[in-house]
Image (tube, rainbow, N blue to C red):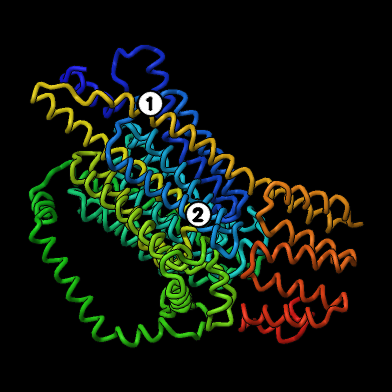
Amino acid sequence: MPAEQALTEARRRSGPSYGPGGGGHLAFRGRLEESSAFLGPIVLIGALALTGGGFSLSSRHIAGLIVWLLVVGLLVLGVAGRALLAKPFYWASGLLLGLAIWSAISSLWSGSVELSVTEADRVLMYLGVFLAAFLLAQTNQRRQRFGEGIAIALTLLAILALASRLLPHVFDLSFDETRGSRLQYPLGYWNGDAILFSFAAALCVWMSRRSLSRALRWFSVGALPAVLLALYFTHSRGGVLTLILAAGTLVVLSRDRLWYLATLLIAAVLTLPAVFASHHFQNLSNNWNFPGIVGEGLKAGLVLLIGIAVTLLAYRWLRRLEERDRPAVGRALAVSRDRRVLGGIALVGLVVVIIAGILYGESAWDKFTSSDLGTPSGLSEVSSRGRSQFWDVALEAFGEKPVLGHGAGTYQFSWDQLRTLDMTNTQAHSVYLQALSELGIVGGLLVLGLVLFLLWTGFTAWRAAGGRERELYAILLGVGIAFAVGVAYDWFWQLAVIGSVFFMATGILVAARCGQLWRARAAVRAREGVEVETDAESRRFGLTIAGLAIAWLTMLALTGPLLVDHEINQSTAAAQAKPAEFESAVNHADTARSIEPWAATPYLQLGLLAQAQGDYQGAIERFGQAIDREDHNWTLYYLRAKAEHQAGQNEAAQNDLNEAKRLNPLETCLTEGFEGCG
């Protein structure tokens, strides 16, 4: 292909569409892909969030299968043939695939093959999200639509969550979904809600100026107070931090920082009346007394609506102020864009942080690392709520096996054995430290390298962009930075909806950066009068073939655990039926065992069923088979000890009970004998 034609082709690919005069089928294909870029994140984020955030295996694996089917569809339709490929794509996808493979390989020395394979499947699901985003975000127009889709999905979730608190009689949620003063719906975890709401608020600020639709610009401004009020109801310090990081990145990296900052501050100030009203209404604030909370919710909602109306009026005033282009406004904008002023503000902020650290750092650290969990006190709370102990255990486990780790998904076993708190926990609350604990230095470097590489790629994409695209990349980078910090102190990596937002955002950024590099290379070769590399089409063909092969293997990997989970649920339901259908329950458990013979869960289920029917010897055998597959799980030893005690094998029962105590020395129920743990 001549160099000039290659350059033209590169510009066409990265432009807002497939270009005029491309034919009806090309126009239709362009509209279809643009619609997919807009609706895809709305569907995925909404579905995962409304099923508990994708924490459960079934919801996560179903979402993963759908995402990989989308990838297959895009590859079959030839999207890869139009993709602009460069090193950032190969590095990002390679690091993700490498992490998945290393997690799977760790099952060879893991304390649980089942858990290690499940963790590998989680990474493969994220790889599918990244690939789908990359393939769909091949033009500026589709990248814009993708960003808007993410923003709308998260904003609607925040509004829905807020409505569940203000209008509980309308939603009629179960107690488990609404208990406690902190807003837990829809993820079931207030910090998880908070990070999504903080993303939503930052994206609304961006969309208020950069959406392609005037209606969406007004919608984002009107939704901002509702999103901020939802964030307040989570009482999450982490949510405030991630909002500062995401919105702060947009403000710092944008030339329109003054307008963005003004929009956010106005919305925050006009949300305060609703915050004060909510705090004043005790039933609403503490989430109790159902009849009373309804009336208070309606009153707080009315205050919020007034705040929204005033916010929209203030936004209109800001727009008119900008349109009039008065000298005072021009001077303010010039000051806000002066790098010396920005540097001075950053220096002052750094000095303030250093002084605060000197004055309060020691006492704050003592409170943060205290083992006294106490009662959550909201945004003013200093305690880590056990996190420092979670991290200590992860580091201690890493010290035991620094090269290979204990195996993906097995942190919970390290916690049971090494903990200093009498507290149930399965996550290290830091993906970086958990990776070190479970996957050793290799896995730790893979996770850290993956996150840092994606952020660096996003930064370079922003730096090389201009205009509307530059603002989009700034907010997506802000979301990525907020996620990278968030997963350092909480278990957001395990919530698929949060991880998916990160990999969608970075997939867009990688696609943008690849397009920039591809166009730059084509421009250089055009000036030199030489042809571009002739293997570009073969590499796209290779991507299609490799993508289809990985998709096929991944869908097989996701299907097995999903079927096992379904069969175990069916078995449990049959055993709990009135009267119990034990034959059906055993058949379902046997089916699960035949699907994944390496998994401990089917054998555990078969052991429990045998024990319930009085077949203690059969239960002992099944529990033993489960222990062979998960030999660091104290509960399996306890269950076998209980069955041995029931069978009159007291010496064996005592040995298993002692092993359970060794694996979980702080478990108080084990001191009560064979019936202590229920």
- In percent of width and height, residue 657 lies at 72, 80
Q: Can residue 590 be seen in the rendering of this structure? A: yes
**In the image, residue 179 above or below residue 567:** below
Q: Residue at x 31, y 43 (%)?
A: 509
> In the picture provided, is 666 more to the left or to the right than 357?
right
Residue 267: give x, y in percent of width and height.
34, 56
Q: CA distance from mark 2 to mark 1?
A: 29 Å
**Which residue occupies 49% across, 59% down?**
193
* Residue 294, picture quadrant: bottom right
Tag 1: amino acid: Phe
**Mark 2 and mark 1 residues within 8 Å of each other at the beta carbon:** no
Residue lying farthest to the right in this orientation: 579
**Quadrant location of the C terminus in the rendered image:** bottom right
Report how many numbered discs are placed on residues in the image.
2
> Residue 5: which numbered mark, if any?
none
As drawn, is 181 to the left or to the right of 585? left
Q: Nearer the viewer, mark 2 or mark 1?
A: 2
Q: Residue at x 82, y 49 (%)?
A: 587
Image location of residue 107, percent across then percent down: 55, 57
> Which quarter of the figure has residue 615?
bottom right
The residue pinned by badge 2 equals: 105
Q: Which residue matches tag 1?
A: 541
| Of callouts 2 and 1, the N-terminal one | 2
